[in-house]
Amino acid sequence: MLRLKELRAKKGLKQSEAAEILGIATSTYSKYERGESQPDFRTLSKIADFFEVSVDFLLNRETKVKELSHIETGGMLNVSNDELVLVVNYRQLSDYDQHDVDEFVKHKLKNSVEFSEDFLPRTADEFVKMDF
């Protein structure tokens, strides 16, 4: 379960800490991360709940988080499912790869109709305040 390691790292936890929270042995948790063992359904559900993702996400069957509320927009943005998938995937990238994506988007915007550097928001708050 490759995503398990990524999710644990995002929470800033050691394997032993995640295992303790989930009530399983560290060696068992480690085997889950390495794909050497699979959790039973009850444990899989507990892991999904802890990391706030679906069981399908853990099993690499989808790329969506459980709820749109994970994107902190204060309800001011209408985010489509496709856009949500992009955000979730973006967050899984390394900082270096996120920078590449940012540069690519800026390049695409520059080549689109009437673009100015002032158009690009620098924070989520600035983005929410933008008038499209």
Image (cartoon, helix red, strand yellow):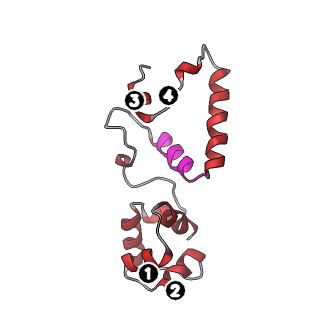
Residue at the disc numbered 3: 128
Q: For the residues marked 3 and 2, what is the alpha-carbon distance in whole angstroms?
A: 44 Å
Q: Residue at 38%, 33% (x, y): give it.
A: 78
Q: CA distance from mark 4 to mark 2?
A: 45 Å
**Disc 1 to disc 2, C-alpha distance:** 15 Å
The magenta segment: 82-93
- Amino acid identity at mark 3: Val
Q: Secondary structure at mark 1?
A: loop
Please determine whether, in this image, residue 129 is positioned above or below residue 10.
above
- In primary-sequence order, the first of circles 1 and 2 is 2
Mark 1: few/some/many CA within 10 Å (<14, 14-19, 20+): few
User: Could you say whether the residue bearing mark 3 is in a helix, strand or loop?
Assistant: helix
Q: From the viewer's perspective, is the residue at label 1 or at label 4 nearer?
A: 4
Residue 40 bears which disc, if any?
1
Q: Residues within 10 Å of mark 4 (few under 14, many from 20)?
A: few
Tell me which numbered mark, 3 or 4, is placed earlier along the sequence.
Answer: 4
Q: Nearer the viewer, residue 20 or 57?
A: 20
Residue for badge 2: 27
Depth-wise, is mark 1 or mark 3 nearer the camera? 3
Residue 107 is tagged as none
Q: Is residue 92 magenta?
A: yes
* Residue 94 in sight in this render: yes
Reading the image, the residue beneath label 4 is: 121
User: Observer-nearest residue: 101 or 96?
Assistant: 96
Mark 2: which amino acid?
Ser
Q: Earlier in the sequence, mark 1 or mark 3?
A: 1
Q: Position of residue 62 (x, y in %)?
A: 51, 57
Name which residue lies at 37% across and 82% down.
Answer: 23
Q: Dot 2, crowdedness within 10 Å: few (<14), some or many (≥20)?
A: few
Structural distance between the alpha carbons of marks 1 and 3: 42 Å
